[in-house]
Amino acid sequence: MANEGKIYRISGPVVTAIGMEASMYDVVRVGDEGLMGEVIELHGEKAVIQVYEDTSGIRPGEPVINTKETLSVALGPGLLTQIYDGIQRPLPTLEAEMGYFIKRGLDADAFDMEKKWTFNPVASAGDAVQGGQVIGEVQETETIVHKIMIPPGVSGTIKSIESGDFNVTENIAVLEDGTEIQMLQKWPVRTPRPYTQKYAPDTPLITGMRILDFLFPLAKGGAAGIPGPFGSGKTVTQQSLAKFSDAQIVVYIGCGERGNEMTEVLDEFPHLIDPNTGKPLMNRTVMIANTSNMPVAAREASVYTGITIAEYFRDMGYDVALMADSTSRWAEAMREISSRLEEMPGEEGYPAYLSSRIAEFYERAGRVNSLGGDDGSVTVIGAVSPPGGDISEPVSQGTLRIVKVFWGLDAGLARQRHFPAINWLNSYSLYPPSLNQWYRDNIAQDFPEIRTEISTLLQIESELQEIVQLVGSDALPVDQQLTLEVARMIREYFLQQNGFHDVDASCEINLVYKMAKAILTFQTAAKAAMAAGAQLEDITGVPSRSTLMRGKFEASYVDDIEEMVATMVKEIEATVEDN
């Protein structure tokens, strides 16, 4: 049997070839146009291939050529600032070659193979090196240093290493056994990159969103799911996380999203300024754009391409945030390919292996000690788009079984224009017990206790609302009326956040704590004043309370808030003297 076979059968993106020697996950070129595909099943002499491009117009009898390689991504300087499709073809390069519509069978290098990079070695001749060890550095963008590593599985003693300007395919070092080292590495996307040790999650990913940082924190190296119905703000939430979270590298996968949404992201991201450095956000971002009208098999591959790139930067010692928007479209691609393969369908037509694939993907998140000795992390945040917002469907359930953070978006809150529309009664995070020590050491000793008090007040409010709907709030005892007023303050002042406002879009963690503390200070002062005979209407009407609530839109708020709270307490105490 040879490396070349012939097309026997075609069913959408699934093609069967005969007369070809193949192994599982070999990359093949299908038809006269050389469409890229991957072997996913073997039956005797028949190889079943999923094709990453549109198969219309190809016919039985056309050649199929086996490259004998697995689906791999190119890793090296030049990754950052790129916008790829699902199989790591750079879209700007494709556009330059063929205009706005991608033609079939076209290949493009993942980045400019001829561009010269200035390589500064940190290892020298005679050093013993092993896979994953950093041997030099390249200043890839203004903000990110790209560390050049020995490929995993390679080890030895450096015979020679050079500094200067090289392209990614030129040799920068040679080992004693003759192994040549370049800046370019290839890695198969379905194989997780190795590491030495995985750590327990004990450092939070600071997102800049108050409801997430305070009530439902996510650890660096953790995994979160954002299920929500159409129009509830999944994409805006993920874009906000990409812009403002304290990850050093962002990998954004637009997996099967609508073209107009993806266009918005591609238009907006290149103009965004990184709040930490003042430089363009794209300097530390890799984007994978796979819209809903692109071939389904490439959509299935896009999440693996994205997470392999994320693991590569993790191995350099960076904290990486990976956004997958949305994993439901990825699962739908799996379902379509599975039905073409005539596999036995599971629940709602999804393949029986759906849950294990979802678990495999999220399990690649983690904070690790890399082979080179650096600590890095990959934090995965996956959006889920359940049909009709019903999270009892298989993709949502498969996600919830594996992730430890659930940010449940609520269409009702979105209709009330409460954004981010994350429902504080349905959402949860399992990380607080392991993160509490970090909050105590870095923010305030009573941070966990304040969080518990705020959560309790929101819980009590939801119970009181049932009574209010029956008899009205005036029928409640005055202390419960105060609880409702404080809970309204939590919702409107604290949890609501304008993602498009220059100041309010992102909130420092210290300010988050001060704002939560301000609400509880109001409650304590109000209780004391009411016990001394003050009226609730007088207390809630003090001018400085409104000033405090409106002040969050001012850039100087973090410096002014303590003074505002002190003024508010004095005004509340004055309501006692007036009575």
Image: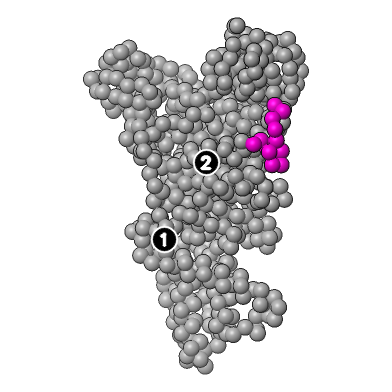
Count every numbered label the image shows and give the total.
2
- Residue in view at x 36 percent, y 61 percent: 440
- At which x and y percent is residue 278? 45, 45
Would residue 239 be visible to someone looking at this image? no
| Amino acid, disc 2 | Tyr
- At which x and y percent is residue 108? 57, 20
Give the spatial CA distance, label 2 vs label 1.
30 Å
37, 443: nearer the viewer: 37
| Location of residue 265 (image quadrant) | top right
| Amino acid, disc 1 | Asn
- Residue in view at x 74 percent, y 23 percent: 11
In the visual, does 490 lie left or right of 147? right
Residue, disc 1: 510
- At which x and y percent is residue 262? 64, 39
In the visual, does 101 lie left or right of 214? right
114, 335: nearer the viewer: 335
223 w.r.t. 563: above or below: above
Q: In the image, which residues are magenta?
A: 341-352
User: Hey, which residue is sitting farthest bottom in the picture?
Assistant: 579
For the residue labelled by badge 1, is the local secondary structure a helix, a strand or a loop? helix
For the residue labelled by badge 2, is the local secondary structure a helix, a strand or a loop? helix
- Residue in view at x 47 percent, y 46 percent: 222
Residue 486 lies in the magenta stretch: no
Q: What is the crowding at mark 2: few (fewer than 14 residues within 10 Å), some, or many (at least 20)?
A: many
Which quadrant of the rendered structure holds the N terminus? top right
178 w.r.t. 558: above or below: above
Residue, disc 2: 362
In the visual, does 39 lie left or right of 315? right
> What secondary structure is the magenta-colored segment mainly?
loop
Residue 348 lies in the magenta stretch: yes
